[in-house]
Image: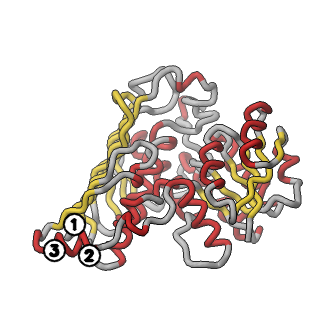
């Protein structure tokens, strides 16, 4: 089946369109919606579709099967609810919700609507992660032990010239929510859900409301320990994972937007088993990577095939993890997960002094 898609927002939405166009037999980009008509028209020329400046007009179109939400973060939750009510499946950029309570409302709306929400975590689709998954399926890596994560990017005043960035009212959070959310998702995927958090956050690099540096410690349900170092004040853009399993140590590439698409190192703790690790297929039969791989998995899922599609639970977990990080920093406490929904932070990431 070919699914007809409307892309809302032609900023990061351009990257989405790039991926969708690689799957022209499975997706048709029917509409590009943006307030910048010139930008929307330039993308519609690529897709052969139409343009719109009205979200309501797009949602009312009976020919649209999937709405792909690439809007400023504060709009993600409300527009997702509207799209579900209009009978559309939803692809939604990160963060998918403005609070944990809103994420819970999205889960309930998905359940009652009969439509599906697919949060965007395209980092999952790359040659390094493809091989790691195969090694895990073959039982060769063993239990997770420790991991270190680096999200060291360079964000200066020109990045924050966009008025919705760096604000709790529109971006909702800072580097934890907008930058490191992808790398944290990879840890939840391969090390298990986080069950305990300690965190320290700073705003040290730019004159913004939201955090741009963080040092985070986590424990996962497997008993593994994880550290996450985040800054927007680095000299370049680097995303890196080093994951130590019982039998194998895994180190990612450092490509900032797609660490999984670079070559990874897989080192056997027992040198005699290195040949066995190396023999597991990696890039030779690689599926599509990045956004194309992400969309391919969605098409398979909607077609009822086995897939590694990102489903709502992953997006909800990412919101709960970010919420716990903010709560740990503000209280100075070690915070257990799942979170108590009566906590005020579950209703929004904005600290009380900004309310």
Residue toward you, 284 or 39: 284
Which residue is found at the position 39% from the left and 25% from the top? 204
Residue marked by disc 3 = 273
Q: Are marks 1 and 2 in contact (CB under 8 Å)?
A: yes
- Category of crowding for the residue at label 1, using alpha-carbon neighbours closer than 10 angstroms: few (below 14), some (14–19), many (at least 20): many
Residue 180: quadrant of the picture: top left
Query: Which of the two discs, 1 and 2, labels the residue nearer the N terminus?
Result: 2
Q: Looking at the picture, does residue 208 appear above or below residue 176?
A: above
Where is residue 285? Give x, y as percent.
Answer: 42, 69
Residue shown at 47%/59% (left/top)? 125
Q: Residue visible at 22% across and 66% down?
A: 248
Q: Is residue 273 left or right of residue 76?
A: left
**Residue at image point 36% right, 37% down:** 152
Closer to the camera in the image, 250 or 322:
250
On-image quarter of the C terminus: top right
Q: In the rendered image, which residue does mark 1 sit on?
A: 248
Circle 1 — which element?
strand
Q: Is residue 57 above or below residue 337?
A: above
How many marks the image carries: the answer is 3
Earlier in the chain: of badge 1 and badge 3, it is 1
Q: Which mark is residue 140?
A: 2
* Marks 2 and 3, the one that precedes in the sequence: 2
Pointer 2 with pointer 3, Cβ within 8 A: yes
Which of the two residues, 251 or 82, is positioned nearer the viewer here? 251
Mark 2 closeness class: few <14, some 14–19, many ≥20 residues within 10 Å: some
Q: Considering the numbered disc 2 on the image, is that residue within a helix, a strand or a loop?
A: loop
Left or right of 339, for residue 129: left
x and y, in percent, of residue 188 in the image = 41, 61
Q: Residues within 10 Å of mark 3 (few under 14, many from 20)?
A: some
- Distance, label 1 to label 3, CA atoms, is 10 Å
């Amino acid at each position: 089946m070919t699914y007809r898609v409307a892309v809302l927002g032609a900023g990061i939405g351009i990257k989405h369109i790039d991926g969708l166009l690689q799957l022209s037999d499975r997706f048709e980009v029917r509409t590009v919606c943006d307030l910048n008509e010139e930008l929307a028209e330039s993308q519609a020329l690529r897709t052969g579709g139409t343009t719109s400046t009205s979200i309501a007009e797009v949602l009312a179109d009976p020919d649209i099967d999937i709405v792909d939400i690439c809007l400023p973060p504060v709009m993600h939750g409300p527009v997702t609810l509207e799209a579900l009510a209009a009978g559309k499946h939803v692809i939604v950029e990160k963060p998918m919700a403005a609070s944990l309570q809103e994420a819970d409302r999205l889960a309930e709306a998905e359940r009652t609507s009969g439509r599906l929400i697919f949060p965007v975590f395209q980092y999952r689709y790359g040659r390094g992660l493809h091989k790691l998954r195969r090694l895990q399926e073959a039982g060769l890596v063993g239990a997770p032990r420790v991991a270190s994560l680096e999200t060291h990017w360079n964000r200066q005043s020109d990045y924050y010239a966009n008025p919705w960035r760096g604000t709790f009212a529109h971006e909702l959070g800072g580097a934890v929510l907008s930058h490191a959310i992808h790398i944290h998702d990879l840890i939840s995927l391969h090390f298990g859900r986080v069950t305990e958090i300690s965190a320290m956050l700073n705003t040290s690099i730019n004159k913004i409301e939201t955090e741009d540096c963080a040092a985070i410690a986590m424990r996962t349900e497997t008993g593994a320990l994880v550290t996450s170092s985040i800054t927007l004040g680095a000299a370049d853009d680097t995303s890196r994972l080093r994951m130590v399993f019982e039998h194998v140590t895994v180190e990612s590439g450092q490509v900032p937007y797609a660490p999984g698409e670079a070559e990874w190192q897989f080192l056997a703790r027992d040198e005699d088993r290195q040949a066995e690790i190396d023999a597991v297929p990696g890039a030779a039969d690689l599926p599509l990577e990045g956004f194309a791989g992400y969309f391919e998995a969605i098409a398979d899922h909607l077609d009822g095939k086995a897939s590694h599609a990102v489903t709502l639970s992953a997006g909800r977990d990412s919101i709960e993890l970010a919420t716990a990080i903010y709560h740990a920093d503000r209280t100075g406490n070690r915070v257990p997960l799942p979170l108590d929904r009566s906590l005020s932070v579950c209703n929004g990431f904005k600290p009380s002094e900004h309310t």
